Amino acid sequence: MKPRHLVVLRGRLWINPSGDAHTLQCVARTRKGGRCHNPVEYGQVLGFHEFQLGSAGYVQAYGDLGGTGDSVEVDRWLAQHCTLHDTPDVIDCETPELRRFDIARDAAHVQAHRTDIAYTGGEPVDGPAGMQGETTGLVDVLFEAATRLHPSPGYINGHDYSQWYIEATPDLLGALAQLARSCHKAELADRLERLSQPLCMEPLDAVLSYGTFPKIWCFRPVTADGLPCDLHTPEHAANLGRCTFGDARDPRICRTAPLAGSDRCEDHAAYCRVVRKDGMVCNRRSCRVPQHRDVTRT
């Protein structure tokens, strides 16, 4: 999918001249003095739409088609802050990149014809007659994928039947995405294609615990199921205000907030931080190796 530089906020078009408006990076300064690596928005909360600018042509933009939007979220977007740095006392490391869209200055982003329908120089090819054969083939693929659906337990034992679910498999989501695209539902097709891939799914709620079901996740694609994206490895835990403990056996960030004045939670504060000769961190709980204890005291 090609980059879309425009975003619609409060019914007005804004542009990110340097890249995709949907992938804006937070401009806040972190506690270490550098720029925050978090995106302004995780996943795709709103949608992609096409707007006609009178006789000038068409533009594609990310945002709320209704044009109103939540005022707090709009202010956060214009300030170019992630949810973690959406506070009055935050200090910016760089200037926000969004500016008002100008139809003359930004004419390169205006297209003469709609892009969500086929254009051959004459009348647009639209409607079921021009795509009947293609749609029929996609429906067959969809039905084939649907035959492989089956229930799975939400937990290992599966004793509680309310915890069983039927997983939307990648091939089913991929077939739905192709069908949506053939029916000119570009926004839905993009979303289904993303959901058909392995996703980071790192919980992003401000307050987390292992016994709490998260409400916000990261929907960035990853190379394999269970892996975090490059923004949500333990090396970036401090940017999220989370415990910075890392273990080579678990690539995920600890969900618990660090203790006051520390970068680790109460449980992981007791783990040894000394780097061994083989380059690995000791990570023993309440380590009793004399050399390690001497380093820790210094």
Image (cartoon, rainbow, N blue to C red):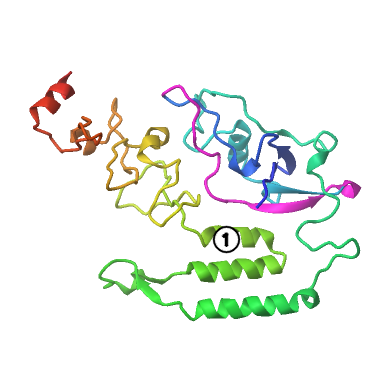
Q: Is residue 255 left or right of residue 147?
A: left
**Amino acid under disc 1:** Glu
User: Vertically, is 61 above or below 224?
Assistant: above
Q: Residue furthest front?
A: 278
User: Which SS type dominates the magenta stretch?
Assistant: loop
**Residue beneath disc 1:** 193
User: Vertically, is 140 above or below 157?
Assistant: below
Question: Does residue 146 appear in the picture of this structure?
Answer: yes
Q: Which residues make up the magenta segment?
A: 32-56
- Asked which quadrant contains residue 100, the reply is top right
> x, y (%) of residue 217?
45, 50
Question: Does residue 9 appear in the picture of this structure?
Answer: no
At x 66%, y 58%, the residue is 187
At x 28%, y 33%, the residue is 264
> x, y (%) of residue 97?
65, 31
At x 45%, y 21%, the residue is 33
Of residues 259 and 112, the one nearer the viewer is: 112
At x 46%, y 51%, the residue is 222
- Asked which quadrant contains residue 184, the reply is bottom right
Q: Is residue 291 left or right of residue 224?
A: left
